[in-house]
Image (tube, rainbow, N blue to C red):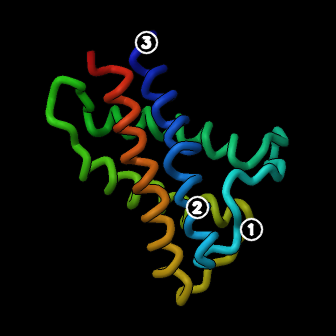
Amino acid sequence: MPRLALFFIAGFLAVPCFHQPLVGLLHAYGVIPFAPFATAPTLPLGVPAWLSAAFWGGVWGVVMLLVLRWDANKPQPWLKGWLFGGIALTTVALLVVFPLKGLGLEPKQLPGRFLIGFLLNGAWGLGTLIFARTFLHR
């Protein structure tokens, strides 16, 4: 299977296996109001929200692993993966995705939302690296 396809699969699987379980924990403890594995349809295709998130996780998995110049034969960039997911994905979510969805963001909400996004997306970054290493380290 082509390397980029495996990068996509790694990022895709990191959403249901790392990101969404952490959403569940944060929801269970009352930190966030939304539950994991949301089935609400997303625009424009009407697919469940978690599946849309997994698709975009796959796209971002390709981007992250290319940016990090990931190689299964070199030491793993665990910290870089966590930081890439935590910073890059959260920044894009807050500055691009939220406005596109019509979600307002008051300046006083920014630190809390960034911290939660950092945790969730950092978990995705680590999960993506774990899956990439599993698929490509032979």
Cα separation between marks 1 and 3: 37 Å
Quarter of the figure that contains the N terminus: top left
Q: In the image, which disc is placed on residue 102? A: 1
Name the residue that disc number 2 marks: 23
Measured along the vertical axis of the image, is residue 8 above or below residue 48? above
Cα separation between marks 3 and 2: 31 Å
Disc on the earlier residue, 2 or 1: 2
Which amino acid lies under the numbered mark 2 shown in the image of this protein?
Val
Cα separation between marks 2 and 1: 22 Å
- Residue beneath the point at 56% across and 54% down: 21
User: Among all residues in the image, which is located at the extreme top?
Assistant: 1
Disc on the earlier residue, 3 or 2: 3
**Callout 2–callout 1 Cβ contact below 8 Å:** no
Whole-percent x, y for residue 69 in the image: 25, 32
Which amino acid lies under the numbered mark 1 shown in the image of this protein?
Gly
Count of number-bearing discs? 3
Secondary element at image label 2: helix
- Residue beneath the point at 49% across and 60% down: 120
Answer with left or right where residue 32 lies relative to residue 4: right
Q: In the image, which disc is placed on residue 2? A: 3
Which amino acid lies under the numbered mark 3 shown in the image of this protein?
Pro
Whole-percent x, y for residue 63 in the image: 42, 37
Q: In the image, which disc is placed on residue 36? A: none
Q: Dot 1: within a 10 Å radius of its alpha carbon, few (fewer than 14), some, or many (20 or more) residues?
A: few
Nearer the viewer's eye, disc 1 or disc 3? 3
Whole-percent x, y for residue 23 in the image: 58, 61
User: Among all residues in the image, which is located at the extreme bottom?
Assistant: 108
Which of 111 and 23 lies nearest the eye of the viewer? 23
